Image (cartoon, rainbow, N blue to C red):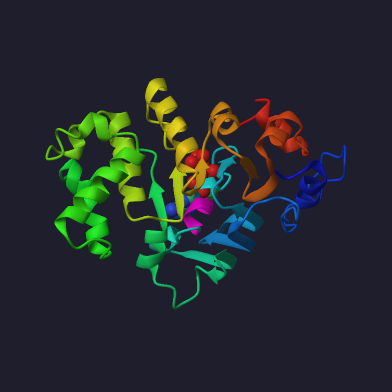
Amino acid sequence: MINEQIARAETGAPKQAHDSSPGQPVRVNEDANHDLSIRVRDLNLWYGKNQALKNVNIDIFQKNVTALIGPSGCGKSTFLRCLNRMNDLIKNVRIEGLVEMDGRDVNEAKMDEIALRRRVGMVFQKPNPFPKSIYENIAYAPRMHDLVSRKSDQDELVEQALRDAGLWNEVKDKLAEPGTSLSGGQQQRLCIARAIAVKPDVILMDEPTSALDPISTATIEDLMDKLKQQFTIVTVTHNMQQAARVADYTAFFHLGELIEYNDTRMMFSNPHTKKAEDYITGRYG
Ligand SMILES: Nc1ncnc2c1ncn2[C@@H]1O[C@H](COP(=O)(O)OP(=O)(O)OP(=O)(O)O)[C@@H](O)[C@H]1O
């Protein structure tokens, strides 16, 4: 875990001071036993003339859950979409800076976007199963990516993905039924199974439980805790308790800037910036 001293170095915040220095490079604690998954440096993004991300610097660690928090419109989803180049699909977007995954800039011209999106899966706020069977929802992408050829391998992969998403026991007898026939919480786990079936390194989740009831939410949170043994998870959430429960690291954004990035326990018990403290304690947002 990042210690307090390193956390201050990351935000540029002196002890007791409540002003951060957004834009300072985030440094990895040399003693911490974490491998880097994604390295972001001086990331700026504009939608037309509106600058939505301002000089963001962050290191995201492998096989941890990192939560992105902050008030509405602060750039959380925009940042998340930078990690798998989903913003490329939006008109008039301009991006500057580095988003490096395993030492390669994801924005470099020769980066294969399809391959990138296989390595970086995404789960959205609203469950969005394909209008296909439960089985096909899982099997389709691995087939497209040539990860399986034999039917028996495909069956095995479908079962494993559904097991890993905690859904197998509920659907094993109705794999031919439409994915859309499942409950909202089950559909979201189906979408998670679909994301993990192509064996990504990273799973991005954009408010994955905000459309779900409390029991389904708790199931997904438990799942995130298990999945981080295999995958790096970056999740956007408006729910402070959820961030505190599921995330190892938390990044607080405000008006497009990364204001504070810290070990989650530190962020919630001893935030280093006044803005993060005000947000976490519910003074705004
Ligand atoms: N497709 C888009 N085209 C133009 N502007 C956009 C687009 N998406 C987001 N923005 C703008 O970028 C800024 C950041 O939006 P973003 O959705 O990333 O924030 P957010 O923190 O995820 O918000 P929320 O919590 O409400 O989902 C906002 O000013 C928003 O209006």
Give the residue at x 45% y 62%: 85
- Pinpoint residue 53: horizontal percent, then vertical percent: 60, 55
- Pinpoint residue 69: horizontal percent, then vertical percent: 59, 39
Q: In this view, does 140 lie above or below 74?
A: below
Give the residue at x 50% y 58%: 82
Residue 181 position by quadrant: top left
Residue that protrudes farthest toward the left in the picture: 176
Q: Is residue 268 above or below residue 9?
A: above
Query: Does 234 lie within the magenta span?
Result: no
Residue that protrudes farthest toward the bottom in the picture: 110
In-image side of 119 versus 169 (left or right): right
In-image side of 172 versus 225 (left or right): left
Instruction: For the N terminus, give its image quadrant.
Output: top right
In-image side of 73 versus 278 (left or right): left
Give the residue at x 36% y 49%: 196
- The image shows a total of numbered marks equal to 0
Q: In this view, does 203 lie above or below 103?
A: above
Give 120 or 230, whichever is nearer the viewer: 230
Please tell me whether the stretch drawn in magenta is mainly helix, strand or loop. helix
Residue 216 visible to the viewer: yes
Residue 21 visible to the viewer: no
- Pinpoint residue 136: horizontal percent, then vertical percent: 18, 48
Residue 51 position by quadrant: bottom right
The magenta span reads 78-82
Instruction: For the C terminus, give its image quadrant.
Output: top right
- Pinpoint residue 262: horizontal percent, then vertical percent: 70, 43
Residue 129 position by quadrant: top left
Query: Does 80 lie within the magenta span?
Result: yes
